[in-house]
Image (cartoon, helix red, strand yellow):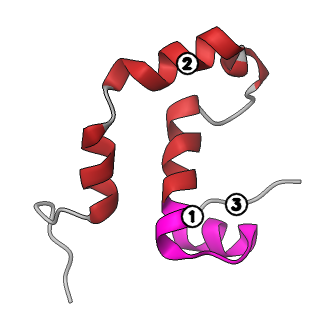
Amino acid sequence: MKSSKREVTVLKQICKLIPGHLVEKLAKRHGVNKQSRTYSPWSHVISLFYTQLSHALSLNDVCDALNTPYRA
C-alpha cells in the first residue's frame, strides 16, 4: 500500500496534543539539553512515545523501525 502525505497516524495525533514549547522548556529547566549529544529533547520524547505505541521489546526494535543507526 502506498503511503500518502495526508495520512494521520496515532503518533502524529499525540504529538499535536503536546504544546510546542513545553518539551524545550522542560529540557532547559532540568539541564537535559546540555547533556544531549545527537538527539534533540523533542526527538527523544517522540521516540519514547513510539516505543510505547509499538510495544517494542528492545532498542534494536526501535532503531530498526525508525531507521536510525544505533551507536554505542
SS for tag 2?
A: helix
SS for tag 3?
A: loop
| Residue 54 falls within the magenta-colored stretch | yes
Counting other residues with Cα less than 10 Å from the Cα at mark 1, is it few (<14), some (14-19), or many (20 or more)?
some
Is 56 placed left or right of 49 in the picture?
right
Task: Kindly give the residue lying farthest to the bottom in the view shown.
Answer: 1
In this rendering, is residue 17 above or below 58?
above
Task: Kindly give the residue lying farthest to the top in the view shown.
Answer: 29
Give the mark, 3 or 2, whose residue is nearer the N terminus: 2
Give the mark, 1 or 3, whose residue is nearer the N terminus: 1
Q: Amino acid at mark 2?
A: Leu
Give the mark, 2 or 1, whose residue is nearer the N terminus: 2
| Residue 25 falls within the magenta-colored stretch | no
- The label nearer to you, 1 versus 3, is 1
Task: Kindly give the residue lying farthest to the left in the view shown.
Answer: 6
| Location of residue 26 in the rendering, given as x and y in whole percent from the top left corner | 55, 18
Q: Quadrant of residue 44?
A: top right
- 1 vs 54, nearest the viewer: 54
SS for tag 1?
A: helix
Q: Which residues are magenta?
A: 50-66
| Location of residue 2 in the rendering, given as x and y in whole percent from the top left corner | 19, 82
- Provide the residue designation for mark 2: 26
Give residue 30's mark. none
- Provide the residue designation for mark 1: 51
Q: CA distance from mark 2 to mark 1?
A: 21 Å
| Location of residue 70 in the rendering, given as x and y in whole percent from the top left corner | 76, 59
Is 26 placed left or right of 1 in the picture?
right
Contact between labelled residues 2 and 3, with CB atoms less than 8 Å apart: no
Q: Quadrant of the N terminus?
A: bottom left
| Location of residue 42 in the rendering, given as x and y in whole percent from the top left corner | 50, 34
Q: Residue at x 65, y 75 (%)?
A: 61
